[in-house]
Amino acid sequence: MENTEKIVQKEEVKPTWKKVVYIVLNVLFYAFIIFLLAFAIANISAKKHNNIPSIFGYGFMTVASDSMEGNKEDSFKVGDLLIVKIVKDEKDLEGLTPEKDIVTFYDFSQEILITHRLVDIKESNGNPLYVTQGDKVEITNSSADYKVGQEGYYLTETLGESEILAIYSNKIKGAGKALSYLQTKAGFGLCIVLPTALLLIFEAYLLIKNLFEINRQKLAQELEAKGLNQSANFDPEEEKRRIREELLAEMRKEQEMKAQEEKENKEE
């Protein structure tokens, strides 16, 4: 009886560090799954030409041009990751300040999303008009508009309220390249799908391992209840092997009997 008690106690008492590691791994696993789902949903929702991938009201974009490379604190460069707040209605545009705020809009002529600085707010027929321009400008004639593509000069865009899709919130230098790679099939597979598959395999391994341990404890308790552990040399693993052999022998016996009955039926 002492042998079984020792086995059960050994299985029930786990080191604290193992419990902590297990909890941390589970938290990381489920956090990663949530991130994966959010990322997938964000990219699916951005399939339309003028949609921005977003999670919980905030979008993220990679800077693809140098039009905002300036000397201001919130200017940004090619390859940076922009975090923008999605505009839901006109109320979100209240309080926009020229030279301070940066907005995102869709340019139908170039078929791209553009994020430029708000440089002026005008009014037409009682409706506000928002004038934007990139930080990288060298304008000698302030009244002139210059075409995008002409080196050093960027067109000022005048937008209506409905054309502003998001408002700049923050940036992460250089992280846009990583996002662009994640949005490719290869990047999504290597950085999202593969790690998720490995985590699922690991979780399945832990589940199976725990099930075996639970069954082992139950077997030890059942044997204890039947008084099969009174011998000092009693081994639960050996007892399991013996039970398996008995079950296999019983199955073989049933198969032989069934085969014999079929043979007799054929002879009749």
Image: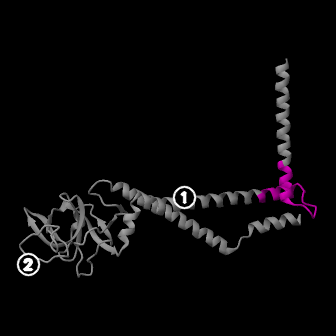
Between residue 27 and residue 153, name the one nearer to us: 153
Q: Which residue is mark 2?
A: 140
Name the quadrant containing residue 202: bottom right
Name the quadrant containing residue 204: bottom right
Name the quadrant containing residue 216: bottom right
**In this view, 213 is above or below 13:** above
Identity, as a three-letter code, of the amino acid under mark 1? Ala
Q: Quadrant of the C terminus?
A: top right
Q: Are there few (<14), some (14-19), or many (20+) residues within 10 Å of tag 2?
A: few
Identity, as a three-letter code, of the amino acid under mark 2? Thr
**Whole-percent x and y of residue 37?**
45, 58
Check residue 242 for magenta coloring: yes
Task: Tell me the SS state at disc 1.
Answer: helix
How was the colour assigned to the protein in this rendering? one colour
Residue situated furthest front in the rendering: 151
**In this view, 108 is above or below 177:** above
